[in-house]
Image (cartoon, grey):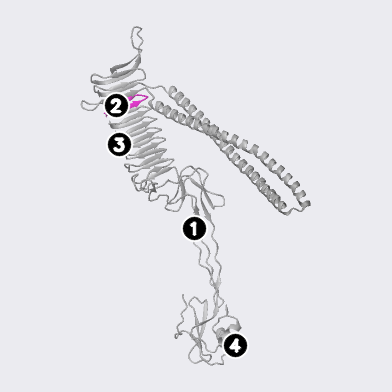
Amino acid sequence: MTDTIERPDASETIKKDTGFSLRISEDKLRAYIFPKGDMNSNITLDEIKALLEKEGIKQGIVVDSLITEYLEAESIDEKPWKIAEGKPPEAGRAPQIKYYFEIDSLKIGRLEESGRMDYKDRGKIPQVKKGALIAEKIPGKAGTAGIDIYGKKIMPPNIPEVKFLHGKGAEKSEDGFKIFAKIDGRPEVQNDGRISVLNVLQISGDVGFETGHIDFDGAIEVRGSVQEGFRVRGKSLNAQEILKAQIDIAGDIVASGGILGSTIKAGGKITANHIHNSTIQAAGDIDIQKEVYDSKIETNGKFNLERGNILSSSISAKKGITAREIGSMSSPVCTLVVGVDNMLKKEVGNINGRIAQKKEEQRSLQLLIEKLQQEFEKLDNEIEDIPQQEDRARFQQIALKKNMEELVKLNDSSKIAKVKEAIDFLDSKITQIQGSVENLLDEQEQVMETITKHQEAIKNSEKEVENLRDKINELTESSQNEKGIPVVKVSGMLFAGAHINGPHASLDSEEDYQRTIIREIKITEPDSPLDWEMNVSPLR
């Protein structure tokens, strides 16, 4: 409480025979005296101290000399004068929790170089590896007690305890002051304060402006939809719908409500109610419930649409296609490719493109190295020539110094000055030559460092090319080990006009087929002009 400087009220203790009033602050940490009315000029130090003693004030009283000086002043100010002061308690410091990840990672957006704000990019989702330190408790500090003017102890305020709890996917250190990740995943402070690491990212609504793009190295569960214009990357994805979005998932994708206008790449299976106007690549099977319309789909597994229709689409499935109906009387024709690993061709093409780019980078670096080597040789020649320049300057100096000795004997002061000037000039020239050598050596060292750096970059690039070629061999071998199944099964109607291609044969259907199976077979008849054909037979 702030001390008041008003005159005392009836509750104050007044020592009438001294003519002084005594005021105590509400927190009992300060005592003040001030005169009341006409004051007896003979008030002594002992009387003032007696006043304090009667009130029980014994802590923090000012020294006697200051009280005496106050009393002996020609005129005593009526304002309260502090005569005693206690010591307030010193508050402690509460324990704190230091987080090694962003608790609130979502930002309003990302400012692009153009100055435009990308509100869809709200920052990365924090992720940690197993064993990472994710939180630490910094111990608090106890406060110190104070003392009031009556000599009574004043305890410091209590320090609130801080919860430091771990949940799923996390564990505490033995001393209880650190929390580490037990698994790879997303660190999170939950509602009850527990610090957990979750390998599943659960989104209660849509992937949209509230969440921004999603990039999470784990399972992603979306109760709503992935909205138009947003990107999702992760290990797996389960959502109601995927609407005009870009999806790159290492594993499986489930879109129970369907896929519309999206570009999707999956390293595993895809399950959806329907697919419209989309481009899709999958390493695993694709299972659709109702319909595929105006889409381009490639899979290294099976394509299954047993209860639905394929309309106006191009589908490539290494292990065959099953559908209820393919095409219609009015829709554009469908193109079906079975038994062929189109994804391998694309992947190998992409890798070969990267190899070509690496080779071009190597050629550019080699040209730079050749130019730098020429520069290095040029600097080397310049450095070799410098000692000769220095030797010539020193020989000239020796000759001039001998000439100086003769001139000193002759006491020819005018010529002595000129010779001395020439000797000084040669000294300066020699210093410059030596400096030039150092500069050229430094420049040569920098050139050599750059050459070494480029040579190392070429070596690293060659290793990357070797790894890429190994990747091609690995993909090719894997594809050859998993034989394709060039079969199309239709339980309903296959309408005329469909193009069906296998590894070795093709078929352009000129008529409608009801309940049919089309498979590529090898022709064994010796007189046949073809080795393979697309065989059409009833589906049993």
Magenta span: predominant SS is: strand
Three-letter amino acid code at the position of disc 4:
Asp
Residue sitting nearer the eye, 489 or 449: 449
Closer to the N terminus: mark 1 or mark 3?
A: 1
Seen from the viewer's position, the closer of residues 382 and 493 is: 382
Mark 1 vs 2, N-terminal side: 1
Disc 2 to disc 4, how far (Cα)? Answer: 112 Å
Q: Residue at 61%, 43% (x, y): give it.
A: 439
* Relative vertical location of residue 28 with respect to residue 41 in this rendering, above or below: above
Q: Is residue 292 magenta?
A: no
Q: Crowding at label 3, few (<14), some or many (≥20) Cα neighbours within 10 Å?
A: some
- Mark 2–mark 4 CB contact (< 8 Å): no
Write down the region rendered in magenta: 306-321
Residue 212's x, y, as percent?
Answer: 37, 46
Viewer-side label of 1, 3 = 3
Identify the residue at image location x=43%, y=27%: 348
The location of residue 192, given as percent across then percent down, is 43, 53
User: Where does label 2 land, which residue?
Assistant: 323
Label 1: which residue? 162
Answer yes or no: is residue 285 visible: yes
Q: Earlier in the sequence, mark 4 or mark 1?
A: 4
Q: Amino acid at mark 2?
A: Ala
In the rendering, which numbered label is found on residue 261?
A: 3
Distance from Cα at disc 1 to Cα at disc 3: 50 Å
